[in-house]
Image (cartoon, helix red, strand yellow):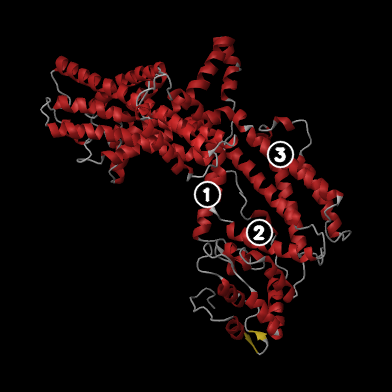
């Protein structure tokens, strides 16, 4: 029999029962088709849009049809009898591995081809009946009082009936809780976790205490010394205290990440413990009975939780959200600190940014000429990717180490600094208008800093590239762009090439370079790289204690930026070759390089260029700079908002405040205001 073949939806509850109950017997007593069709009858087409689901008609049907009520009750009891579900409680929806990529791959695989558990388990029943992820959404919209009425009408036994049964409901919950507490104890004692919370070094592990205290309660329940847990039970109160200490342990570990750094594996391990603690808290509450009615209530709560865990066990969105939030926060914390140096305020800082941008433009002028010379090499696409990447990487690293500025590097570093204004405003309970106003002021400072960086880069990249190509021509008699000037100019024109799209690609790489910088800083901090260099006995004997300490300090300050610029060079240098390999129109356009390439193209054409060509090159230059900026800034802003759990729709309010500030003080976006 095909359980899920497409059928017309029954018009009434009685039609379903008449179809599956013949001669006072269920046609297929060991099959799920009866329950499946009954659930399908109540399942709405759009669970998220419907306000509520009612079971009043079903309850009324059972009251009016005693025979059907008895038969259906026995059918359900027989269907669920002796089905284990401890694995569903202990595993479903909880990260099973500290490898984030593996966990993502596993969940995607299970989305495509869902895991089917053993037939004797309750998870198998849930997979067959409540097989949609949205099932818990509409079930949760059923009024709880109606679930209680249905439970009582069908005369189901509560979970406290007997604890000695091996596959009794409460016994399964206790077994699962025992597994979870043991797993938490073992994971919390790992070296990588203990290093995150040195405050607990000389204290007894709260996880071990939680495990032992739960074993005491489990022993009493299994021996039937108690039938349930009362709220005033001393063991239960101690269990709650220990649970809170475990939660504090995890919170302290996450809090210390800014001090000690954190890796993705440690983050995943802590996240797993946090998920397990949340699961333990829910399950422990099911043991508590204050009055007789609570037995029914807790039985229904358990059923609802089992359906929820089964529906959400392969949820990818939640996994990515939880797994990346802390890491992205730590990365953006680093970029926020770095970004503070890229936002000017006074006229002196503005002038200093201009001078730094001139230095960046000077080096880029050389890089443009070197790349043209490299393009004449007789090598493969891989060879071009390698030499271009080398050219870019060395150039970007030199710009960084000399303290110069490359236009468009600011947005990826400064978005987090801007978000700090919003975050601090939320903490201080400022009015929305005030925190948005502060953001607009800071954004104006960022924009004018970026503007003057553009100007500085462009102003010097053009003449330096022009001077170099003239010197080469003068000394060798060879115009290195005499056959390439069309390409150099057409690549910048937005009407003759995909310059805007390629500028967006460069913006993505600028964003990624900021991520890499923050990740390297965070990872090295966690692995104590700089401390290990500082205390390395060989280096101390060779260089001396003072110089070794200076080396460690210099690397701590500069190494993340060096790695970031090296990778940015690789991205920029290899994109075109990868596009060639894939048969896609992939390339990069950066405003500073575009300026240098205009100079090289103009010289190659012997300056015999039409006015429209000059005009389109100028328009292309401005558009390339704009999209370099807006793409890297938008991506960085989104990450910063996500890392601080600020709703994305906050962007619209920020946009309005920036526009309002621009209308009032337009010159502030280009030049520092007079004091």
Residue 436 place in picture, x, y as percent? 48, 36
The answer to whether residue 458 is above or below residue 131 is above
Q: CA distance from mark 3 to mark 2?
A: 26 Å
Residue 229 place in picture, x, y as percent? 83, 56
Q: Which residue is mark 1?
A: 104
Q: Which residue is mark 3?
A: 248
Instruction: Please tell me whether mark 1 sits on a helix, a strand or a loop.
Output: helix
Q: Residues within 10 Å of mark 3 (few under 14, many from 20)?
A: few
Q: What number of labels is visible?
A: 3
Residue 282 place in picture, x, y as percent? 71, 54
Q: Quadrant of residue 625?
A: top left
The answer to whether residue 230 is above or below residue 249 is below
Q: Quadrant of the N terminus?
A: bottom right
Single out the residue that lies furthest toward the front.
664
Please report contact status of discs 3 and 2: CB closer than 8 Å, yes or no. no
Q: Which residue is mark 2?
A: 88
């Amino acid at each position: 029999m095909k359980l899920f073949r497409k059928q017309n939806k029954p018009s009434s509850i009685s039609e379903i029962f008449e179809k599956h109950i013949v001669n006072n017997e269920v046609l297929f007593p060991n099959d799920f088709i009866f329950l499946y069709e009954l659930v399908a009858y109540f399942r709405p087409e759009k669970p998220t849009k419907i306000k509520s689901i009612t079971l009043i008609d079903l309850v009324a049907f059972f009251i009016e049809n005693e025979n059907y009520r008895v038969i259906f009750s026995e059918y359900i009891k027989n269907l669920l009898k002796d089905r284990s579900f401890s694995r569903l409680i202990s595993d479903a929806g909880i990260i099973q591995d500290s490898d984030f990529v593996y966990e993502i791959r596993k969940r995607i695989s299970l989305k495509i081809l869902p895991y089917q558990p053993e037939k004797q388990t309750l998870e198998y029943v849930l997979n067959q009946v409540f097989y949609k992820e949205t099932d818990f959404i509409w079930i949760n919209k059923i009024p709880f009082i109606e679930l209680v009425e249905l439970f009582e009408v069908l005369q189901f036994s509560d979970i406290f009936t007997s604890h000695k049964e091996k596959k009794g409901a409460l016994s399964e919950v206790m077994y699962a809780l025992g597994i979870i507490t043991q797993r938490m104890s073992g994971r919390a004692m790992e070296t990588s976790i203990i290093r995150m919370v040195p405050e607990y070094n000389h204290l007894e592990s709260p996880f071990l205490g939680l495990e032992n205290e739960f074993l005491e309660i489990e022993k009493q329940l299994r021996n039937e010394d108690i039938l349930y847990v009362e709220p005033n039970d001393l063991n239960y109160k101690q269990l709650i205290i220990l649970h809170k200490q475990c939660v504090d342990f995890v919170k302290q570990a996450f809090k210390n990440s800014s001090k000690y750094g954190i890796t993705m594996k440690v983050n995943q391990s802590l996240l797993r413990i946090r998920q397990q603690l949340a699961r333990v808290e829910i399950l422990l509450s099911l043991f508590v009975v204050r009055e007789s009615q609570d037995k029914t209530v807790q039985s229904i709560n358990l059923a609802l939780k089992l359906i929820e865990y089964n529906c959400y066990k392969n949820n990818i969105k939640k996994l990515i959200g939880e797994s990346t939030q802390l890491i992205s926060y730590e990365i953006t914390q680093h970029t926020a600190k770095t970004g503070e140096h890229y936002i000017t305020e006074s006229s002196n800082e503005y002038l200093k940014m201009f001078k730094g941008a001139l230095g960046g433009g000077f080096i880029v002028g050389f890089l443009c000429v070197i790349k043209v010379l490299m393009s004449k090499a007789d090598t493969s696409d891989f060879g071009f990717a390698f030499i271009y990447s080398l050219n870019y990487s060395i150039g970007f690293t030199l710009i960084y180490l000399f303290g110069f500025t490359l236009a468009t590097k600011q947005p990826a570093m400064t978005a987090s600094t801007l978000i700090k204004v919003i975050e601090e405003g939320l903490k201080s309970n400022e009015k929305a208008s005030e925190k948005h106003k502060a953001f607009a002021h800071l954004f104006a400072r960022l924009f004018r800093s970026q503007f003057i960086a553009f100007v500085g880069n462009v102003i010097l990249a053009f003449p330096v590239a022009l001077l170099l190509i003239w010197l080469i021509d003068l000394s060798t008699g060879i115009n290195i762009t005499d056959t390439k000037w069309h390409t150099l100019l057409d690549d910048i024109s937005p009407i003759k090439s995909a310059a805007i799209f390629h500028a967006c690609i460069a913006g993505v790489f600028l964003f990624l370079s900021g991520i890499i910088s923050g990740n390297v800083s965070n990872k090295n901090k966690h692995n104590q790289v700089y401390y290990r260099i500082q205390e390395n006995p060989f280096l101390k004997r060779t260089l001396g204690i003072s110089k070794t300490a200076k080396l460690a300090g210099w690397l701590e300050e500069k190494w993340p930026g060096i790695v970031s610029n090296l990778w940015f060079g690789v991205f920029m240098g290899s994109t075109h070759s990868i596009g060639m390999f894939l048969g896609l129109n992939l390339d990069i356009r950066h405003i500073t390089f575009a300026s240098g390439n205009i100079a090289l193209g103009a010289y190659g054409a012997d300056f015999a260029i039409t006015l429209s060509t000059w005009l389109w090159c100028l328009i292309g230059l401005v558009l390339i700079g704009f999209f370099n900026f807006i793409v890297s800034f938008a991506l960085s802003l989104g990450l910063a908002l996500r890392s601080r759990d600020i709703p994305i729709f906050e962007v619209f309010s920020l946009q309005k405040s920036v526009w309002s500030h621009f209308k009032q003080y337009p010159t502030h976006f280009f030049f520092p205001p007079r004091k």
